[in-house]
Image (cartoon, rainbow, N blue to C red):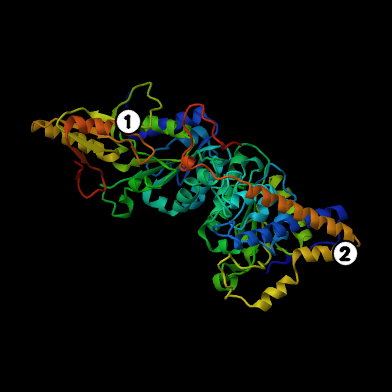
């Protein structure tokens, strides 16, 4: 059985406050998304990350700006740590000002400038991409890390196993981050895997793998920092199983018939934001007025994001088939180009 | 120079590997074995295992890795040994390679080339005999090439590598041993238009890939019967291709017949 890592004591107040802010930003963005979805301002599918914020905040913290992030369809939180709230919300509104001109929507947030590679609606579909991004870095002699997020549901897919094997075989700089929230949509881990210790599966591919308390942002950050350093210094792929929980429904169309309310309530007692806030309070690191200011700042950021999205424009109909293929007109100004 | 379709493909790979350090070949048995159809024979010795990269039998994994490497600035050539194996990588080809440019609003194009063997006629049973190029041609975002001649075997790869989007090259299994003359200075070719392989005035025969030699033979037989057939090689399949020569030819001959390996029979179009 893989031992679960917990954090080692209190952190510096500024740093704790920074992580609190990052998690709160994700929480408030998604609460706003749910509100806007209910008001039919946002269409499509909407999968929120509420409850899992410590994972994105903790893992992205030690990454450098040039490191790649590959995420899943539940990626608003990861995106927000690289892309502005306005660009994300405008994307969900289907507006030209969105981070993908409104072409991607909630499940397909991309941003070339910050090396954010989606947003993938196919469970495990991003893992081979991450392997390839890391292969390009290794072949080009760049010391970058590709962080690849996926849920525990992905573990049942062939692409999970193919990707772990390739990354280990070729010793590629990938940090695999399994967000184990215990349910693949409505299917509990124990109902879908013969071996539920996921870190153990990764270890079977000769990949150093640790299980981490995914509700403890310090534990996540600490494990991620160790893993990122090891990957960047040529230690090959590493694997984190981040044990977390989704507080809300899978999507906006989920009556949650598959789990007990008491179970959800139990996990909510370990809300990662509350855990951090409580520990900061206990250490005297979060005076009431600091907390008030922090909340007001985040609320203002989200309100500005909504305003930006509301003011967005729709792409002209003439552009309907643009980007099915690249523009081959000589001298055409392609919006983006795959580059190093 | 005297050469074969297989050697022309190999010359194209060698040329691409020499021209551009970002190019590498990846697939099952492309290195130590020399390629399932011996196309890459000898390239491992010339370019080493980093650039002639043997993979496990993980089609979805290594095709997806090719997409990721293309996003990361490389110019991968992924070999899928035969067309039926490509179905194991369909998620990556259709859901990622073909859609990333569109979903990212033009930010992420995928300059990836995938080569695979296609076609029937070699007593291999149903699975190894699929001709799925027409099927792939229905996927927006992909470009489909079907080299039928030595010049196209030699020339299409470089042009495909210069394309900003994913290109699938279908090599018909019955063509690898076809021998003939190829110009010493043969190089990149246009991949956007069909070609008239035999001019004629009585009837237009449209084909592509591995069926071209049989159709040219049929045209010779028709000539013996007093029918002057024009043979058109599509060279590419699908919506990204302009085919001005088809309408012009039909205008001259008055009727079209369409044939390909894998179809039950030739079809009269008009």
Determine the image quadrant of residue B228.
top left
Quadrant assignment, res B227 = top left
Left or right for A18, reference A316: right
- Locate residue A65, reporting x and y percent: 71, 43
Q: Is residue A314 above or below residue B235?
A: below
Spatial CA distance of label 2 from label 1 is 75 Å
Image depth: mark 2 or mark 1 in front: 2
Measured from the top left, where is residue B134 in percent x and y?
A: 33, 46
Taking the spot 74% from the left edge, 58% from the top edge, the residue there is A23
Q: Quadrant of the N terminus of chain B?
A: top left
Residues marked 2 and 1 touching at CB (< 8 Å): no
Q: Position of residue A211 (x, y in %)?
A: 70, 63
Picture disc at residue A164: none
Callout 1: chain: B
- Please report the residue visible at 8 percent of the width from the left and 33 percent of the height from the top: B225
Q: Give the number of the disc on residue A281.
A: 2
For residue A333, side relative to residue A277 (left or right): left
Counting the numbered discs, the total is 2
Kindly indicate whether the residues beneath marks 2 and 1 are on one polypeptide chain: no
Residue A317 in view (yes/no): yes
Residue drawn at the location 36% of the way across and 21% of the way down: B184
Assign the C terminus of chain B to one quadrant of the image: top left
Mark 2 lies on a secondary structure that is helix
Q: Is residue B66 visible?
A: no
Label 1 sits on residue: B150
Question: Dot 1 lies on which element?
Answer: helix
In front of the other: A302 or A161: A302
Q: Is residue B103 above or below residue B251?
A: below
Looking at the image, which is closer to me, A263 or B18? A263
Q: Chain of mark 2?
A: A
């Amino acid at each position: 059985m893989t031992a679960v890592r917990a954090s080692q004591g209190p952190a510096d107040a500024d740093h704790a406050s920074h992580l609190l802010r990052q998690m709160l930003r994700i929480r408030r963005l998604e609460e706003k998304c749910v509100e806007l979805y209910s008001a039919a301002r946002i269409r499509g599918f909407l999968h929120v990350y509420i409850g899992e914020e410590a994972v994105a905040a903790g893992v992205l913290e030690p990454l450098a700006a040039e490191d790649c992030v590959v995420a899943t369809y539940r990626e608003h939180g990861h995106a927000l740590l690289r892309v502005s709230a306005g660009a994300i919300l405008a994307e969900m509104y289907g507006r030209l000002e969105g981070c993908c001109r409104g072409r991607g929507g909630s499940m397909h947030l991309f941003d070339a400038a910050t090396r954010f590679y989606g947003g993938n609606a196919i469970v495990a579909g991003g893992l081979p991409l991450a392997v390839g991004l890391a292969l390009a870095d290794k072949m080009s002699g760049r010391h970058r890390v590709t962080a690849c997020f996926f849920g525990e549901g992905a573990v049942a897919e062939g692409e999970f196993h193919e990707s772990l094997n390739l990354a280990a075989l070729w010793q590629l700089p990938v940090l695999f981050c399994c967000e184990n929230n215990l349910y693949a949509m409505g299917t509990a881990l124990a109902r879908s895997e013969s071996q539920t210790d996921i870190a153990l599966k990764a270890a079977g591919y000769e990949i150093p793998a640790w299980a981490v308390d995914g509700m403890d942002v310090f534990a996540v950050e600490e494990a991620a920092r160790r893993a990122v350093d090891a990957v960047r210094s040529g230690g090959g792929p590493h694997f984190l199983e981040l044990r977390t929980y989704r507080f809300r429904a899978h999507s906006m169309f989920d009556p949650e018939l598959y789990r007990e309310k008491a179970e959800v309530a139990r996990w909510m007692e370990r809300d990662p934001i509350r855990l951090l806030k409580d520990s900061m309070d206990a250490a005297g690191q979060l005076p009431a007025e600091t907390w008030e200011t922090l909340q007001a700042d985040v609320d203002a950021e989200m309100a500005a994001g909504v305003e930006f999205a509301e003011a967005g424009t729709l792409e002209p109909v003439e552009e309907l088939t643009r980007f099915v293929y690249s523009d081959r007109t000589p001298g055409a100004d392609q919006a983006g180009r795959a580059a190093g | 120079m005297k050469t074969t379709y297989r050697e022309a493909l190999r010359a194209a790979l060698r040329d691409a590997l020499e021209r551009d350090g970002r190019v590498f070949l990846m697939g099952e048995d492309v290195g130590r074995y020399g390629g399932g159809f011996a196309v890459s024979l000898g390239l491992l010795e010339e370019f080493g295992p980093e650039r002639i990269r043997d993979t496990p039998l993980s089609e979805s994994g290594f095709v997806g890795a090719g997409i990721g490497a293309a996003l990361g600035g490389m110019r991968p050539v992924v070999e899928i040994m035969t067309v039926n194996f490509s179905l194991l990588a369909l998620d990556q080809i259709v859901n990622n390679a073909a859609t990333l440019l569109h979903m990212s609003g033009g930010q992420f194009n995928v300059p990836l080339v995938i080569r695979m063997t296609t076609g029937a006629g070699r007593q291999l049973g149903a699975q190894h005999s699929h001709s799925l190029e027409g099927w792939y041609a229905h996927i927006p975002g992909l470009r489909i090439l079907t080299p039928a001649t030595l010049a196209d075997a030699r020339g299409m790869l470089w042009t495909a590598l210069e394309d900003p989007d994913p290109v699938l090259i279908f090599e018909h299994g019955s063509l690898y041993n076809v021998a003939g003359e190829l110009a010493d200075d043969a190089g990149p070719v246009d991949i956007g238009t069909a070609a008239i392989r035999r001019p004629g005035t009585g009837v237009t025969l449209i084909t592509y890939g591995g069926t071209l030699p049989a159709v040219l033979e049929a045209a010779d037989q028709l000539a013996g019967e007093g029918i002057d057939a024009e043979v058109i090689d599509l060279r590419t399949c699908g919506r990204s291709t302009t085919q001005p020569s088809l309408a012009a030819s039909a205008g001259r001959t008055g009727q079209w017949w369409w044939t390909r390996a894998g179809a039950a029979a030739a079809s009269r179009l008009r």
